[in-house]
Image (cartoon, rainbow, N blue to C red):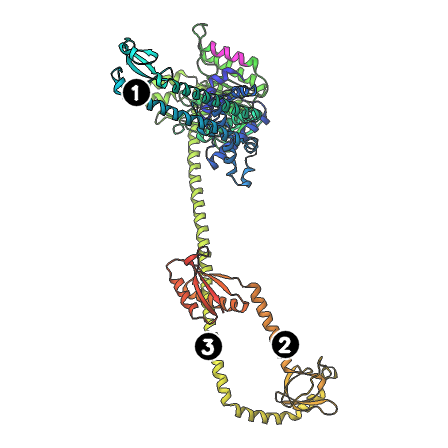
Amino acid sequence: MNEKTFRVLEYKKIVEKLAEKAESELGKKMVKEIKPSISLEEVEYLQRETKEALELIMKNGNPPLFGIFDISHELKMAEIGGTLNPNNLLKVSDSLRVSRSLKKYMKELKEEETIKFPILQGLISSLRALKFIEDEINNAIINENEISDNASPTLRNIRRQIINKNESIRNRLNSIISSPKYKKFLQDSIVTMREGRYVVPIKQENKAYFPGLVHDQSSSGATLFVEPMAVVELNNELRELEIKEREEIERILKELSALVAEEAKNIRNNQNILQRLDFIFAKGKLALEMDGTKPLLNKSGYIDIKQARHPLLEPKEVVPIDIYLGKGFNTLVITGPNTGGKTVTLKTVGLLTLMAQSGIHIPADFNSQIGVFDQIFADIGDEQSIEQSLSTFSSHMTNIVDILDKVEQNSLILFDELGAGTDPTEGAALAMSILDHLLKLNIRTIATTHYSQLKIYALTTDRVRNASVEFDVETLSPTYRLLIGVPGKSNAFEISKRLGLQGYIIDYAKTLVSKENVEFEDVLQAIDKDRKIIEENRFEAERLKSDVEKLKEELTKEKEKTKAEREKIITRAKEEARSILRAAKEESDHIVTELRHISTEIEKDRNKKIQEAQEKLKSSLDQVESSLSKDVLNVKSKKIPKNLKIGEMVEVLSLNQIGNVLELPDENGNVQVQVGIMKVNVHISTLRRAEEVESEKTYTSTKKIIKSKSSNIKNEIDVRGSTLDEALLDLDKYIDDAYIAGLKEAYIIHGKGTGVLREGIKSYVKGHKNVKSFRSGKYGEGGEGVTVIELK
C-alpha cells in the first residue's frame, strides 16, 4: 500500500485508537504492526476474529487480560540456568494467571455457545494453565522486594532465629544505656545501627571508659558510634543468620527458576497466544466503541457502504452517508459547495476500505459491502512546497503522475478537486482526460470537483455517475448528505442574493455566463427541485406505510385478544356446563332413589298385572319356542350346571337372558325357566349359573377401571389460576380417581396468593370420605403453596 495514502487518510490515527484498547505492551506492539491485507481469504479471517471478539465481549464482558508481560528475556535466562529475581518470577506468575483466567472465562459459556467462537475457542484452548508453578511462585513471593516465610520451613526457622537474636541484642543494649555505670558516657540514650550492626552513641572523650568497637563517628567528631563488647558476639551471630537467610532465598529463587525453565516452551507459547488474543480483543473493543459492523467482502471492486460514518469525527455530529461504486459505473464525480462534505466523503470511503482490509470493523450499517483492493491511492489536500517551489497545481499534478505510474488492476483512486489550481478550462480538460484514462483501465475512481464540464462529462459518459453534496439555500448551510445520480449546483447566484447582493449586479453577472452554462444550471435547479418533491412524497409514503403497518399490528393484536377472550368464554361455558351436569346427575340420583322407594310400594300391584300378562302371552310363547332355530337353541354351555335348585338364577345361552329355574331337569335334561314374563323349556346344556356371569363381568369391569385409573392418574393436581368452585370440582374427581388407582399420597398445588384457595381446599379435604389426613407442603415440596393429602 502507498504510504502517502496512509498519511492523507489518517490511517495511523485509527491504529492509535486501536492501540489504546490493547491491555499489554505486547498487544500494542502487534497493533502498531497492523497493515491492510490484499488477500480476500486473509481479510475474511481477520474480520471473523473481530466479529467473534465483539460478540464475546457483548455476551460475557471484557476478558481478563491484565497482567500480560513480555517475559522472553526471563524465559531465556531460566533456560540457560540463570536465577530469576522476584520481580521476574511475578511476571511469569501473572502471565500464567491470565492464561488460566481466560480458560475460565471461556468455560462460563454453555457448550452449545462455544461453537459460535471457533477462532477464540481454539486459541484459548491452546493455552496451558500451569497452576502448580503459579501457586509455587505466589506462595513464595509477596512482592518484588519480599520473600514470604511460607517459601520454605528452613527460611521460616532462620527468620524466627533472627527475630529472637535481634530481641536479645536490643535487650542487652537497653540494659547498657539505662545502666548508671555507662549512662554518663553516652551522648544519647538510644540504640542505632551502623554497617548492619547495633551501636550506641558515645562521647568522644569517654571512649577510653567504654569498651567496644568504633564503627562510625558524627560529622563533628564529637560522637562515636560504638558496638559494646557485650553484644559483639551476638551481632556476629546475627550476621551469620542473615547470610543463611540470603542463601536460603537464593536457593528458593533458583528452585522456582528451574520450574519455569522446565515449562519454558509452554509459557513462551502462552505468551504468543496472549499477545494475539490481546490484539483480537482490542479490535472487538474498538468495534464496540465505534458501533462497527463486519462488512461483506468481495474481490470485484464493488463498494456499497450504508450509513457510513467517518471514525475520527464526533459520532453525535457526523452525518451518515450512503455511497456505492463498481456496479453499473466505475467513476463517481462529486460536486457541490466548499465545506459541504466532499473531502470527508472521500476520506470516509478510503479510510473504511483500509480498516476493512486490516480486519477492523467499519462504522456503518450491517451488510455494507467493501472491495478488497490491491492498491489504494489518494490525492487529497493542498501539499504545495515552498522549498521545492511547487504550486498547489504542481503539487497535485506531481502526486497524480506518481499515481498513474503505479496504478494497476483492482485499485481504488481518490482525487480531491481534480484539475484545480490552474486555468479552469485547461484544468477541466485535464481532469476529464485523467478520468477517461482510468475508466478505460477499469479502475474504481472517485473525484471531487467544482467544474461544470465534469458534471456534463459524467452525464454523457457511460460507466460514469454524478453525485453531489446537498446544500440548503434557505439556511445557507450544507446538510452533508450525499446524493448519487444528481450533479451539484454551484448556487453562487442564489447565495449572493440571500446575502444581500443587489439584484442588478446578479442579473448582469448572469449575462456574462454562457447561455449553455445558464441553461445547464437551470436544469440542475429543476432537477434538484423535483428531487426534493420526490423525497417529500417518499417520506409521506413511508409515513403512510408506517401508519398502515402500525394499524395492521394493532389489528393483529386485537384479533389475538378476541381469540383469547373467545377461548376464555368457551372454557367458562364448559365449566358452567360441567357444573350443571353434575347438579343434574345428583338430582337424577335422588329421583331414582325416590322411584325405587315408590316401586316397592306398588310391587304387589305390579306382580298382579304381570301374572295377567303372563297368562295372555303363554300361547304366544309356545309358538316362539317352536320357531326358534336349531342353531340358536343348541348353544352349549362350557360348564353344564349341576345340582340346580328351584328358584336359582341361570343364564339361558340360546336367548342370552337371565331367568329363574321353575322345574328341575327331567330324564331328557330339559328344564323349565322363567325368563321375564315368559316360561321356556330349554336343555340343561344351554344353561349357565348367573352368579358366575355376574362375578366374571364385575371382576372384568372393575379390573379394567382400576387399570385405566392407575396408568393415567398422577400424584399431583395443579389448580393455580382457578376459582375456588372450579378447583373443588376438579379436586373432587381427582380424589375419586386417585383413590380408585390406589395412590397413598397426592399433592394439591394451589399456590400461596391470598390464601382463599388454600383454606377452601383444606376445608374440603378435611371432611372427604376418601381422605385419611392432610398437611401443608414441607421445604422442597412447595411449602404453603402445596397441600399434601393421605388417601385411605
Side (left or right) of 392 relative to 46: left
Q: Nearer the viewer, mark 3 or mark 2?
A: 2
Q: Are marks 3 and 1 in contact (CB under 8 Å)?
A: no
Q: CA distance from mark 3 to mark 2?
A: 32 Å
- The residues colored magenta run 394-403
Please rate how many residues cluster around mark 3, counting C-alpha atoms within 10 Å: few if below 14, some from 14 to 19, many from 20.
Answer: few
Near-viewer residue (15 or 168): 168
In the displayed structure, 771 sits above or below 60; it is below
Residue drawn 42% across and 37% down? 539
Q: Nearer the viewer, residue 185 or 369?
A: 185
Front one among 79 and 371: 79
Please give the count of numbered marks on the rendered protein.
3
Q: Which amino acid type corresponds to the residue marked 3 in the rendered image?
A: Glu
Q: Secondary structure at mark 2?
A: helix
Give the residue pinned by disc 2.
696
Q: Is residue 152 magenta?
A: no
Question: Is the residue marked by circle 1 packed among few (<14), some (14-19), or many (20+) residues within 10 Å?
Answer: some
Q: Which residue is mark 1?
A: 176
Tell me the crowding category of disc 2: few under 14, some 14 to 19, or many 20 or more residues within 10 angstroms, Cα based: few
Q: Earlier in the sequence, mark 3 or mark 2?
A: 3
Circle 3 sits in a helix, a strand or a loop, which is it? Answer: helix
Mark 1: amino acid: Ile
